[in-house]
Image (cartoon, helix red, strand yellow):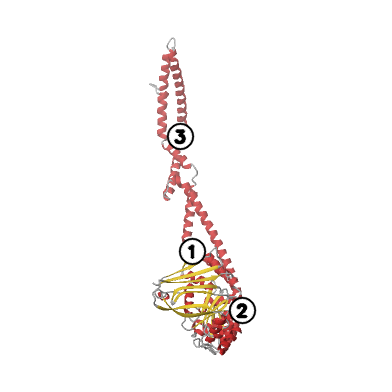
Amino acid sequence: MLNQLAIRNYAIVEHLQMDFSPGMSAITGETGAGKSIILGALGLTLGDRGDKDSVAAGAAKADITAQFDLRDLASAKDWLSENELLPEAEPEICILRRIVASDGRSKAWVNGCPVTLQQLKIIGEMLIDIHSQHEHQSLLNRATHLRLLDDFAGQQPQAQKLRQLHRLWKDKQQQLEQLNTQADALHAQHQLVRYQLEELQELGLQAGELDSLQQEYLQLNNADTTLATAQQLLDLCSENEEQNILGAINQALALVQGLSAVPASLQITTELLNNAAIQIEEAVSELSRNIDGFEANPQRLEEINQRLADIQTLARKHRIKPEELDNLQRALQEQLQGALNNEEAVANLHKAEAALRLEYLQLAGTLSTLRKAAAVRLASGINQQLTELGMANAKLEVEISALDPQSPTPHGLESIEFLVSTNPGQAPKPLIKIASGGELSRISLAIQVITAQTSVIPTLVFDEVDVGIGGGVAKAVGRLLRELGEHGQVLSVTHQALVAAQAHQHLFVSKVPGKDSKGVAVVTTQIRELNEQERIQEIARMLGGEADIGFSKESLAHAQELVRC
C-alpha cells in the first residue's frame, strides 16, 4: 500500500508530505484547492508524462517521492528482484522517485536506482491503480480486463504458467525457423563434406605411406644411375685390371712382407693395411651381391608415380600440402559427425516443440473453460453493483472472442473485453467509447468491488467517482468504497459528504497564502489529516454549511450523524 507521498516544488505545492493509512481515505477540500494536483504528482511517480509546466514558478525542479509497503505483494517483489532493484536492507519497502527539471527533462529512480519511464510504469501498475476522468484509466486497457477476469476466477498462476509455456514454445519455434532457413545451405554443405570425405577415404592414404613412396620413387627413378655407380665402385675396388684399390693394398703389404725383419714402427701400419684389405673385400662382396640382385622394375615405378600423382592432385584440389591430407580427413570426419549430431538435435527440437505446443493447448483449453464460467459470474456481480450505484439501466457483459488457434497468444486462445450498455436497447460498447467520465468511474467502482478480494493491486485511487450523483446513490458509493477499503487501501477524492463520512481517514486539502523567498505573495497547497471534530466540521461544510459564518447546529448534527453511521 501507499505509505507516504512527498511533493516539492510541483505546480503550486512548495512542500507537502502526506502519510496514508490502510482502509479508505477521503481527500476533500474546496474546488481548486489542489486535490487534482496531488493526484498529478502521484501519477508522475507512476510513470506519467511530465513537462516544464509541472515545476513550480521560480523553482529549478519538481521532486516527488512515493513510498510503498510491499508486504503481501510477491509479484512486485519478484519483478524488483529480477531487475536488481530490491534493496537487501528493506525488501518490504519500495520507493519511487521522479524529478522534472524546469526545462521539461525528467529522471526516475526505484529504490535509489535510475530506471526508465517504462520500468517505472511497470512497477507502478503493480502497486496502485488510479480510476479517474483523466488519462490514467487502466480499465480502458483490454489487458486489464483479462487480468481482472483471471484474478476473479483465481487463475493467475495458470495464466502465468501459460505465458511461460508460450514463451518457451515460441523460442523453440524460432530456433526451428532459423534452422529451416539455413537448411538448404547446410544440406549442400553436408553433401560437399560427405563427398570430400569419400574422396579421401577412396584414396586410402595410410600413415607414413607418403614418405615411404617418395623414398621408393627416388630409388626406382635413379635405378640406372645407381647400377652404373655400383659397377664403377666395383671396378675401382677390385675388377680394374690395371689398377684397383684392393690390388694396391696388397702391393703395399707385399713390400712390407719383403723385409727380412719388420720393424716395430711398421707393425701398426701393416695391421691397418690388413684391416683395410678385409674392409675392401667385404665392400666388393656387398657390391657384387647388390649388382647381381638389382632389378629396375619400371612397372613398380609407374605405379608409385601414379600413386604420388593422385595424392598431389587431391592435395591441390584442397589447396593444401600432401602431408596435410591426413589432418584434413580427420577434420572432415569431425565436421560430418557434427552435422549428424545437428540433425539429431533438430529432431529433438521438433519433439520438444511439439510437446510444448500440446502442453500449451491443453492448459489454454482448460483456462478458456474456466474463463467462460467466471465471465458469467463476474458480469452478474458487476451489474448488481451498478444497480446500487444508480445505474440500473446499465448492463456489463464480458465478451470472449476466440482467436486463431494457429496464432495463439501468451494469454491464451481468446481475447477478453468488457462491454457496457448504459441505456435500454443500446448495443454494448467498449468502455473507451463511454462518453461520461462519471459513468466510467462508477462502472470502474462496481468492477473493483467485485474483484477486490482477488485483485493483486493493493491501492486503488478514485478521483471524483461521485460526480453527478447524490442521495442514496452517493451513500451507496461511500459504502462500496469503504467495503473496498476493508480489503486493501482506497484513496477517494470526493465532494460528497455521504462518501467522505464513510472514510477511515480524512485528509483535507487547502490553499494557504504566504510569501516566497523574495517576499512575493504566493498561494500554496497544503494537506493535513483531520481529527474527529475537524472532520465533522468539514463534512458540515460539504453538506452546504458556511465555514466563514459558522455552522448551524443542524448541519453539525447531521455531519456527526453521518460519521457515526
Residue 373 locus on image (x, y percent) = 61, 79
Name the residue carrying label 3: 295
Name the residue type under label 2. Answer: Ala
Distance from Cα at disc 2 to Cα at disc 3 = 101 Å
Name the residue carrying label 1: 178
Q: Quadrant of residue 477?
A: bottom right
Quadrant assignment for the C terminus: bottom right
Quadrant assignment for the N terminus: bottom right
Distance from Cα at disc 1 to Cα at disc 2 = 40 Å
N-term-proximal mark, 2 vs 3 = 3
Q: Nearer the viewer, residue 293 or 265?
A: 265
Q: Nearer the viewer, residue 32 or 346?
A: 32
Total marks in image: 3
Q: Quadrant of residue 524?
A: bottom left
N-term-proximal mark, 1 vs 3 = 1
Residue 370 locus on image (x, y percent) = 61, 76
Name the residue type under label 1. Answer: Gln
For the point 48% across and 42% down, the residue is 209
Distance from Cα at disc 1 to Cα at disc 3 = 65 Å
Q: Is the residue under label 2 in contact with that under label 1 (CB below 8 Å)?
A: no
Q: Residue furthest top?
A: 260
Name the residue type under label 3. Answer: Glu
Name the residue carrying label 2: 373
Q: Nearer the viewer, mark 2 or mark 3?
A: 2
